[in-house]
Image (cartoon, rainbow, N blue to C red):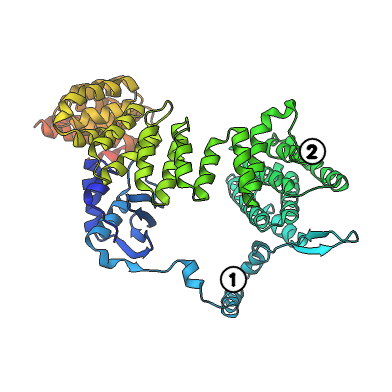
Amino acid sequence: MISLTESTIRSYASEQSFERRREYFYSGAIYITFRQGNALLAECVGTDTYHLRVELDEGGIQSAGCTCPYGFGGYCKHLVALLLTYIHKPGEFTERKTVADLLENVDKAALVAVLTKLADRQPELYAWLETSLPVAAVAVTGAESKPRLVSQVSESAWRKRIKNIFRQGGYADYESAYGVSSDVDEITDSATEILAVGDAQGAITILLILLDELSDAYEMFDDSDGELGDSADYAGEILAEAILSIDWDEKERKALERKLAPIAKNLSDYGIEDGLELAQLALEYGWETHPEYVNDFTTDLDSAKLNVLERQGRSDEFLSLCQQTGQHLRYTQKLLQLGQIENAVHAAYQLSDPNQVLEIAKRLREINQISEAVALAEHGLTIEGQKYHLAAWLAPLEESQGQLEQALQAHLAVFAASPNLETYQHIQRLSGERWKELQPEQVKTLVQSGRSDSIVSVYLYEQMWDEAIAIAEKNAYDYTLRENVADAVVAHHPDWVIRISIQEAEKLIEPTQSKYYPHAARWLAKAKQAYIQSERKSEWLAYLTRLKTTYARRPSLQKELSKL
């Protein structure tokens, strides 16, 4: 059992937030708990049923995810509940094999029998299997007695599957382009898998069909967010890699060029150019050094070449090309992949971007090189650049390792880049007696950020009521901020809450639109609370009576007022 403490979990959430989320653990909402190796899996009952996954390592929590929509910083209450369950009720986690382990000793006949049964129950599974199982190209000998790979990809099966993608949707369904883009990406991923088993020609066949059908169908879809265009570019990038994977003779190159050119022309009419232009450059220049006028695509073409070399296991050539083209991050990543840890760590210290340092530090952690990951990340905080993500990743890891001073420094870096209440509380908690020394500088950083929501949240936490009210007064159109301030200061400044609440409510009542009345009633409820808090209930009742009398002919409003 990997050691985990409540202090570790608390480092991933604010103190106040942690205590609120802790209650979810006591409610018993976590169920169907499993452990697969170092992964914890569970489901949780909330507004919906959510799926949770946490990856652990010697450094504590490596990653955590939940399917709930929470996005306000730190872990959601479901993840906190799962982790607390792991600490206090480890016996509830049943050991479960991975899919690979589960199928490891299953013979082919048994596996075929299971898939046949599934295909009988779900007919669409057969079509998926027909095009999703990678089939290696076979070697044949031509008249020139030179072995050559011939693809086993069924062009007709793939065209049928791809045509089905574009049969639905269009302007009648506003969201259709998004769903189609996901399907297009899935086809491209399948082509990538086929490319990975050595069938470059098969991958080209699939991608040409995909892009051809897309160029004919594109005008049917509302792609205002550009999702479908991005998917087309992605397909073009993989097509470039497939093209670079084949040694073309002039006749073959010309034949492919004739197929590709009209597709590229059709899609360029819709502003979709980058991916297919890259594919055309790959076809034209191959592995040659390209001329000056294609320099805009030089980096992309170099990246495509690196992907090909990596896929083909040509490690020495990969590392050499990385050095030639200045791809330092990929060079370091490859060294790690080859198990050359010491060389990789040395190379990582030459990186000049904190976000690239973070990529390598994460990978070091994944291969259980925790101390090297921490040391590298600490170095990353000393170089120029945007350090928020690196510092946010490092801070809880340092704390889980008992490096409290280093954790404090990381949190200070997070706060400097993006001030917020959660990080403010972490700094306060870790600084101890030094908090009086550190607090003024953090407040100065906070104010200089100009982020009203963060400034107000800290002011309210510190009970700086007047300062919070001043911010709310300046932000007259930030209704959420004004509501938060009103809720927090009702016991301390009831007169202000009464004034602001009545002001906001009457602005919503005045337009004579019933859709605003529930919001007006919410503001009036705050006014009521403030009146009662200041022992002026009779004034509230008098005001409410005047409202009911004034707007007696508005039944929708009267319905809302009757609830107060």
Classify residue 189 as left or right of residue 359: right
Image x and y of residue 284, in percent: 79, 38
Q: Taking 179 as reference, is 293 above or below it?
A: above
Q: Is residue 462 visible?
A: yes
Residue drawn at x 55%, y 40% as measured from the top left: 331
Identify the mark nearer the N-term, 1 or 2.
Answer: 1
Residue matched to label 2: 284
The quadrant in which residue 318 appears is top right
Per the image, label 1 sits on a secondary structure element best described as loop
> Mark 2 packing: few (<14 Cα in 10 Å), some, or many (20+)?
some
Q: Quadrant of the N terminus?
A: bottom left
Front residue of 110/337: it is 337
What label sits on residue 122 in the rendered view?
1
Q: CA distance from mark 1 to mark 2?
A: 45 Å
Q: Taking 242 as reference, is 495 above or below it?
A: above
Q: Amino acid at mark 2?
A: Glu
